[in-house]
Image (spheres, grey):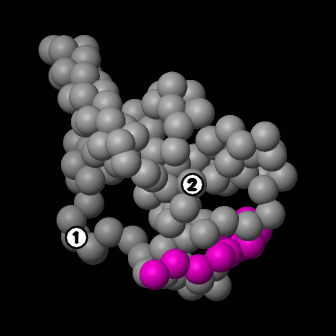
Amino acid sequence: MSRIAPTAELRAGMTLAAPVHDRSGRLLIPAGMTLQDKHLRVLRAWGVSEVRIQDGDPPATEPVPDAAEGTQPTAGEEDPDAAEARLGATADEALAERFQHCDIERFPMDGIYRIARRAMIDELRQSRGAGSR
């Protein structure tokens, strides 16, 4: 289930239930994207007044829960979930322009987008792994 939320009430960590397009129909943020601060800035810059978010997201008045206490990574170590989310966001950002004229919510583009996203994430993992050696 999903609900419509005003842009002013959005917080990082909420998940889009529907893609967000600008006035000309260009894809700004794909559905399923977990919002980050940069996405909130994009929405404000493009004058988007409301978006559809997944129902499980907490309302703006409740703080977004932190990771489980005592499981934070040590210095120099990155949280694997945060790293994976960052890779996914980077891939989504890069693919948004390539798929801007496609409806990635419908067949067959939904499958093509998923394949391209997985390939891009794998490529990013390899390039980051090679860069840290």
Note whether residue 86 is visible. Answer: no
Residue nearer the viewer, 87 or 65: 87
Give the alpha-carbon distance from disc 1 to disc 2, as whole Å. 35 Å
Judge depth for marks 1 and 2 and give the one in front. 2
Count every numbered label the image shows and give the total.
Answer: 2
Q: Is residue 57 left or right of residue 127?
A: right
Q: Name the quadrant containing residue 27.
A: top right
Residue type, label 2: Pro
x, y percent for residue 90: 43, 34
Mark 1 and mark 2 lie on one chain; the one further toward the N terminus is 2
Q: Is residue 2 magenta?
A: yes
Instruction: Give the residue displayed 30% in from the left and 43% down from the top.
Output: 111
Q: Secondary structure at mark 2?
A: loop
Q: Which residues are magenta?
A: 1-10
Which residue is the site of mark 1?
70
Which residue is the site of mark 2?
19
